[in-house]
Amino acid sequence: MSYSAESMALGGGGTAYLTGFEALFVNPANLFVQEKNYNYQLSFLQTGYYFDSLQPVSGTKSRFNQYVDHLAPYSTELNLAVTNREDLLDRSFNENRSTAEFLNQTEINWFGIKWVRPEKNFALAARTRIGSRYRLGKGLYSATPLERDNSFLINQSFTQQYQVLHEISFGYAESFTFLNGLTPGLSEFIVGIAPKIVVPGGYLDVNYRNRYQLDPQSGLWENEIAYNQRSTGVLTDRAENFFFPQINPENPDYGMRDLMRPNGIGFGIDAGITYLITFGDDLSVLRQEDEPTEKSLRISLSITDIGIVYQNNSPFEYDIENQVFEENQTGTITDFLFQGAPNEHYSFLSDYFDPAAFQTFSVSEQPIEVLLPASIQAGALFQYNRLKLMGDISYTIVDNAFKPSGIMGFAGLEIKPLSFLPLRAGTRLAPGLPGYFSLGSGIETNRFDINAAFQLKSRRGGPTSEILGASVIGLKLYI
């Protein structure tokens, strides 16, 4: 839900936990919750990243370098070969799965400001998100058919979504007076809302369907093929070069900075509600201005990224409708890894897909409208002095580059053996994605916080030493 150090250390959730400026993007209602006495919270350049791969990458430095390489447009110098096919299949396509899904993500919180007022709390923040989500068919790496419905299937399909979003969000939270009149004095309903301006950068959406189904009567393979691709900005130049080389023979060379350039404009909104129950000697609901919340139960619900971006800088769409052929044999398997860089699919699919072989296709250069990655979150947090237990469920509404489809679950624990030393741990459960265990710590005082976190990939045998994600040290100042 957030790539802040605190959220990543707790498994990735935070619907009821996050109370700083990050709550703008997860649950704005939590801006009203005070866990320290301050008037202003300031933060700059908090960054987190997540990078999964088909094969393990040895060494933290090598993994980070490979991640950075595949944020930028694809270069043939980045080609990586399969070194252990059996381990690759066991790692990503176990349990007879026909596809495997991967995520490459980064989030940069350029700045965040939260300020506290007697009846309402406000926050302002700017961030950039870069997401690459792709799905690979097992048939790309294995010629062994899968048994499906009394027949055999080889799936060589491929999908990828890549998107850059720049966001400026301003929101506030306040006590919901109407509902509070129906509850005891030591609890309250809090509502929050955060509209935002969204400026999209590079965008790419590729859907390549290539499935072989064995016909038991004829003994032939029915090959189903379809292709659709949308792109904007500099990614369109490479698309036109690939599909129409006779018209656009040049192969442009671009960098990461080009992908960050604005391609349109959009608007979105994040909103949430939190029911805060305090107990024991915690009177922060009654005396919020001078007493922080230390003993509470929070139950939260939020809906985020409701909105749309309108992209009109070099929009391009290429479409081949679904077609079926009969073949004596299936396609070959590849010896190369796919890592998720934008435009990498042209090289990766060159042995499977040749646009010149299709006479019927459609092309459009109309502006493209893309929904923001909307999702619904529900979470709860139990807080007792230096102990916090939290759990979250998230459901993705809109298929997107940043989040997997369907439901994800998060669980986390925070304990402070010393008042300034938080120790955090957590995990995530998401169908189709690898599990991980997360750890984090830092130093938290009345004047500043410094936190860091990392996530270790988990396989069927348990946790590994492979780092999936990390958040560089995030600094917050309190005035």
Image (spheres, grey):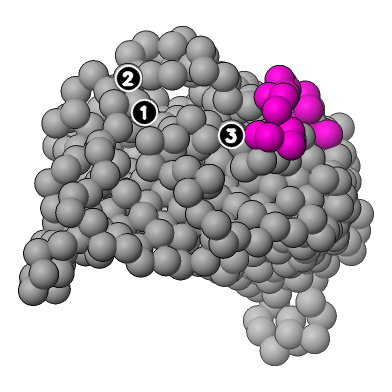
Which residue does the image show at 20% across and 60% down from the upper left?
221
Relative placement, left or right, of 31 versus 464 is: right
Q: How crowded is mark 3: few (under 14 residues within 10 Å), some or many (20 or more)?
A: many
Q: In which quarter of the image is residue 471?
A: top right
Relative placement, left or right, of 240 versus 199 is: left
Q: Check if mark 1's residue and mark 3's residue have beta carbons within 8 Å.
A: no
Quick one: SS at disc 2? loop
Q: Residues within 10 Å of mark 1 (few under 14, many from 20)?
A: some
Q: Which of marks 1 and 3 is nearer the N terminus?
A: 1
Which amino acid type corresponds to the residue marked 3 in the rendered image?
Asn
Q: Which of 383 and 114 is in front in this view?
A: 114
Q: Which of 400 and 306 is in front in this view?
A: 400
Which amino acid type corresponds to the residue marked 1 in the rendered image?
Leu
- Answer yes or no: is residue 256 visible: no
* Label at residue 81: 2
Relative placement, left or right, of 469 versus 16 is: left
Please tell me whether residue 318 is drawn above or below residue 238 in the rendered image: below
Q: Nearer the viewer, residue 457 or 150?
A: 150
Q: Earlier in the sequence, mark 2 or mark 1?
A: 2
Please tell me whether residue 442 is drawn above or below residue 104 in the rendered image: above
Which residue does the image show at 8% across and 74% down from the upper left?
217
Q: Which of 154 and 27 is in front in this view?
A: 154
Which residue position holds label 3? 343
Q: In which quarter of the image is the C terminus?
A: top right
User: CA separation, marks 2 and 1?
Assistant: 6 Å
Which residue position holds label 1? 337
User: CA separation, marks 1 and 3?
Assistant: 14 Å
Relative placement, left or right, of 258 versus 49 is: right
Which residue does the image show at 52% across and 35% down from the upper left?
346
Q: Check if mark 2's residue and mark 1's residue have beta carbons within 8 Å.
A: yes
Please provide percent x and percent y for residue 451. 59, 26
The region drawn magenta spans 245-261
